[in-house]
Image (cartoon, rainbow, N blue to C red):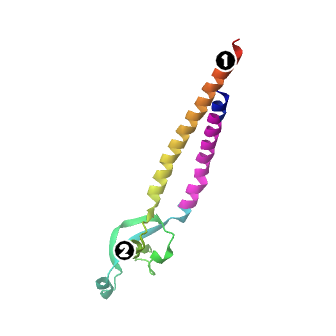
């Protein structure tokens, strides 16, 4: 019983530590996010001086491969991502919204699991104390 109590407190503490560690990790990822517009380049568009067909609206992405970024930004100053290059390389652009939502869900899960482990540790502590006090 004592080992389970110790393990539950240890697990609860480790989960709290991981919960706290998500703060700088998310902050680092948010600092890497830049607003991009995904563009599908085409030779036809190049004939008319255009880069290509814009896909969707500008979003904040975390892009590690800088080769995916086209040389010149659009008329609003938004950097352009080459959709053809991303697909050829098998790179899925990571949206900041997705990262923030995932971290939010992970934080709720970590907090709940940590509280559950700590509550179990307290319950086991009471049972151990009660068992030791009765002859």
Dot 2 alpha-carbon crowd within 10 angstroms: few under 14, some 14 to 19, many 20 or more = many
> Residue 7, located in which quarter of the rendered image?
top right
Image point 37% across, 75% down: which residue?
84
Q: Secondary structure at mark 2?
A: strand
Q: Main secondary structure of the magenta part?
A: helix
Residue 106 point in image, percent of width and height: 51, 47
Dot 1 alpha-carbon crowd within 10 angstroms: few under 14, some 14 to 19, many 20 or more = few
**Which badge, 1 or 2, is on the more N-terminal residue?**
2
Residue 128 point in image, percent of width and height: 66, 22
Q: Judge left or right: residue 75 versus residue 53.
A: right
Q: Quote the CA–CA distance across marks 1 and 2.
A: 69 Å
Q: Secondary structure at mark 1?
A: helix
Quadrant assignment for the C terminus: top right
Evaluate if marks 1 and 2 touch, with contact meaning CB atoms under 8 Å apart.
Answer: no
Find disc 1 in the rendering and name its residue: 131
> Residue 51, located in which quarter of the rendered image?
bottom left
- Does the rendering let one see residue 30? yes
Q: Is residue 16 magenta?
A: yes
The answer to which of 57 and 62 lies nearer the viewer is 62
> Which stretch appears magenta?
7-29
The answer to which of 68 and 37 lies nearer the viewer is 68
Q: Is residue 53 magenta?
A: no
The answer to which of 9 and 79 lies nearer the viewer is 9
Q: Judge left or right: residue 29 versus residue 75.
A: right
32 relative to 7, above or below:
below
Quadrant assignment for the N terminus: top right
Residue 117 point in image, percent of width and height: 58, 34
The answer to which of 50 and 105 lies nearer the viewer is 105
88 relative to 103, above or below:
below
Image point 33% across, 69% down: which residue?
55
Find disc 2 in the rendering and name its residue: 39
84 relative to 23, above or below:
below
């Amino acid at each position: 019983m004592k080992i389970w109590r110790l393990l539950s407190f240890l697990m609860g503490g480790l989960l709290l530590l991981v919960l706290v560690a998500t703060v700088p990790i998310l902050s680092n990822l948010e600092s890497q996010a830049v607003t991009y517009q995904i563009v599908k380049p085409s030779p036809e568009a190049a004939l008319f001086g255009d880069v290509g067909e814009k896909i969707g609206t500008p979003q904040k992405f975390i892009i590690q491969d800088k080769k995916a970024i086209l040389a010149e930004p659009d008329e609003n100053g938004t950097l352009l991502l080459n959709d053809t290059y991303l697909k050829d390389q098998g790179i899925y652009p990571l949206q900041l919204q997705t990262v923030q939502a995932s971290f939010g869900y992970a934080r709720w899960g970590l907090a709940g699991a940590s509280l559950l482990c700590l509550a179990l540790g307290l319950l086991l502590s009471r049972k151990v104390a009660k068992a030791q006090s009765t002859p």
